[in-house]
Image (tube, grey):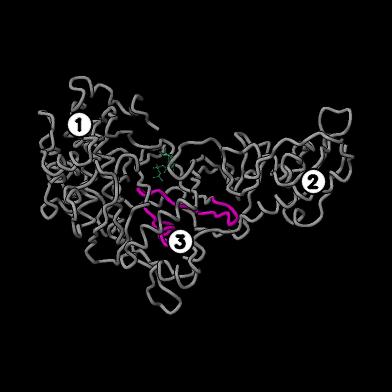
Amino acid sequence: MLAPDEAPPAAATAAAAASPQLSREQPVRHISAPVVGVLRHHRRTPSIGRAPIKETLDASFSYDDDEEGGGVRINQYVLKEEIGRGSFGAVHLAEDQLGNKYAVKEFSKSKLRRRSQSLLLRQPGRRLGFLDAQGHRRSASELYQEQEGGNPLFLIREEIAILKKLDHENIVNLIEVLDDPEGDSLYMVLEWCEKGVVMNVDLDKTAKPYPEEQCRLWFRDMILGIEYLHAQGIVHRDIKPDNLLLTANEVLKIVDFGVSEMFEKNVPMMTAKSAGSPAFFPPELCVAGHGDISGTAADIWSMGVTLYCLLFGRLPFSNHNIIELCDSIKHDDVRLPDDVDPELADLLHKILEKDPAKRIKMPELREHPWVTRGGEDRLLPTEENTADFIMPTQEEMETAITKSIHNVMAVVRAVRKLKRLTLSRFKPAANVPLPHVDATRRTQSLNLDERGHHQQELSAAGHNKEISLDTLVDALPSEVELDSPRIPGTESHPAVEVQMADSTDLRGESRVVPE
Ligand SMILES: Nc1ncnc2c1ncn2[C@@H]1O[C@H](COP(=O)(O)OP(=O)(O)OP(=O)(O)O)[C@@H](O)[C@H]1O
């Protein structure tokens, strides 16, 4: 990830010197050589990491002490170091058996529920919905009421199922979603973008600008990704540098569809919802009581604000007071340096046009001379960029989330059983109280901050590890009152070897061998 005080990857560092706010590297123009990577922007290539979506019905969670960096394993994914943190939980780098890398994002289901309820129930009719067995279009909220007995998790299945079907080089792939039905966590397995967020810029945060040619390449990535989304009837609603990640090859990927909206294909994508980040709001959203606005025009405005950030390292309209920020967005002209490339200035003025009806549209945007270098470097045709999208079926909705991380519960049951078996072999010493054990350790939210406790529990599951009786006792729920199982005359409990080959054993017989 590029922190604001880090140098950008390319030779952009001279840029900010002259004027701290608006300076940038001299425009790179009249380059006749083809763009870096001949195929980039000229041919649709399959996304890296895209494999047929697999629905694993026996998802499991375990802990492997030998794994580097902690070794929590969810199905085939071994979690490595934390690479970021969002409002719903941590994001971890993960690796499968073949060494493929992923980003695994942990979500709190309760937070997701609250968000999806407020978003979906507010405008149930606007959601795309899906086809039921009879081929009728149904909204998620209808099924939420009818079929799921009001289980709010159902409301996000639609979003997830649709995300799984999106397949574009400039949109981060959602590989799989794993649910722990007993706990509060949901795990999204995403394509890993090694270089992280393209730029950290905010109301009170500036960053080093990038060279113009680099910005042009990333803007073309953005065009292709957003054009594809719009063609699928999806408006993103939150385009900003924070939601643009870079791969190892510096290909830009769009993420975060949390406030996106989906529409029937080929209908005007009008919405009354105020969503996104205020500094990236278009002027038409900065009006109290605004009615329906064009979602596509709003995305294009946000693309313009984002391009401005990449070029100049700052927001074009910035104020901590939301009213004044909105006033600035509605009324202030965008400031550009005197020496800006006239074609770039023309583009920015056309995108940051206050009137959405006059704002540049995608077909004109993708052909703009700054984007195509005067026609020398045209993007792949729209038809090629926007392949057909088939609406998710009811079955795909139902399998959108892999549910069976039930083995965690089996581990908990096994630890209880082990405790019973183990304690029966030792005579308790009188009047030595057990330390308090927090009952929340036993929840299945798998909060990675509490990995130590899960390590204790999960080590007992299927890894033939030697664990101490302290560990087993420590795993007890706090409500269980016991005398100490400490062996008189010893500092701690004797070690025991626990042998349980797999979750079947966990549910069946366990063997405990005191030392
Ligand atoms: N697919 C990915 N590849 C690499 N890094 C990622 C990926 N997804 C997220 N990250 C890293 O994790 C950080 C947090 O991501 P996350 O999406 O949770 O945050 P966020 O944008 O604040 O999300 P939210 O809006 O859900 O809170 C990102 O800033 C990024 O550095």
Residue 28 covered by magenta stretch: no
Instruction: Report which residue position mark 1 lands on.
Output: 28
Quadrant of residue 122 within the rendered picture: bottom left
Instruction: Report which residue position mark 2 lands on.
Output: 419
Instruction: Report which residue position mark 3 lands on.
Output: 157
Q: Is residue 123 above or below residue 42?
A: below
Camera-side residue of 12 and 154: 154
Dot 2 surroundings within 10 Å: few (below 14), some, or many (20 or more)?
A: some
Q: Earlier in the sequence, mark 1 or mark 3?
A: 1
Disc 3 from disc 2: Cα separation: 39 Å
Q: Amino acid at mark 3?
A: Arg
> Which quadrant of the render holds ligand 1?
top left
Residue 385 visible somewhere in the drawing: no
- Label 3: which secondary element: helix
Identify the magenta region. 158-184
Dot 1 surroundings within 10 Å: few (below 14), some, or many (20 or more)?
A: few
